[in-house]
Amino acid sequence: MKQDKYWDSVADKKNFTTTFDENEFGKYVDKGARLLDVGCGYGRTLNELYMAGYENLVGVDSSEKMLERGMREFPYLDFVKNDTDLPFEDNSFDAVILFGVLTAIVDNDAQAAIIKEIFRVLKPNGIIYVNDFLVNGDISRVLKYLKCKKAFGVYGVYRLSDGVVLRHHTEKYIAKLLSRFQKLEYVKLKFKTMNGGRSNGFYYIGRNKK
């Protein structure tokens, strides 16, 4: 389910809010590493990495308007447009980050394809850092999940009033999705959402086992 038109339409309005823990990331990735931000949006996290001293950075996203915003706000960063497969050779990066991207992808197969591509472009023993949203137990969200499960076949999917469809995940599903990596850290958090709410979330740091 492609929603690029939606992300183009809100590129100059929405600010992403999931948090990046540079201290934890820095335990596994040195400042000279080559890093890729998959689904970088307008480059918020890329810029945090740059400000923390990482300079060999590349961001990819499928939304042209998000990338245009990124190039305006952070002209010193390297942005690349992609649609499905990542436009890089195998074993190209020391680390890959995936921040708040899975939530915008409803389909299991599409999520699995992204993880497979990340696995491909990561060097052996490379690091993946993921953060995203987990399912919530409050009744209003549960009702939304149940309503959308009929339409999308996945529990945790819901639709916002502006039309975008998002997804929260079960911990069991996330563990399976990332099973090709060696888990180094998994921490549950509370995130502020881009619309000002609060949601369960997590960050995960793993190592490429190939």
Image (cartoon, grey):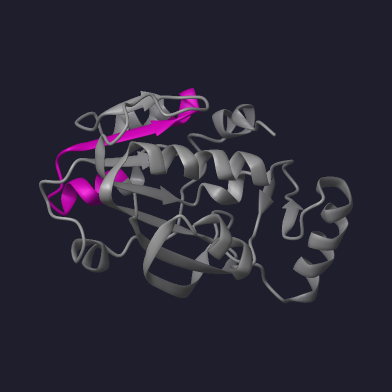
Q: Is residue 156 above or below residue 32?
A: below
Rendered residue at 46%/55% (across/down): 180
In the rendered view, would you say 205 is above or below 12? Answer: below
Q: Is residue 19 visible?
A: no
Observer able to see residue 111: yes
Query: What's drawn in magenta, residue-wise?
Result: 46-66
Front position in the image: 109 or 36 = 109
Residue shown at 17% from the left, 50% from the top: 51
**Of all residues shown, which one is farthest toward the front?**
210
Q: Is residue 65 magenta?
A: yes
Query: Which part of the image, by quadrant, shows the N terminus?
Result: top right
Viewed as shown, does residue 199 lie left or right of 43? right
- The location of residue 168, given as percent across then percent down, is 64, 59
Residue positioned 87% across, 57% down in the render: 147
Residue 192 colored magenta?
Answer: no
Q: Position of residue 75 (x, y in %)?
A: 23, 29
Indicate the position of residue 59 as horizontal and vertical percent values. Answer: 33, 35
Q: Residue at x 79, y 69 (%)?
A: 142
The number of numbered badges drawn on the structure is 0
The quarter of the picture where residue 111 lies is top right
Q: Is residue 30 left or right of residue 207?
A: left
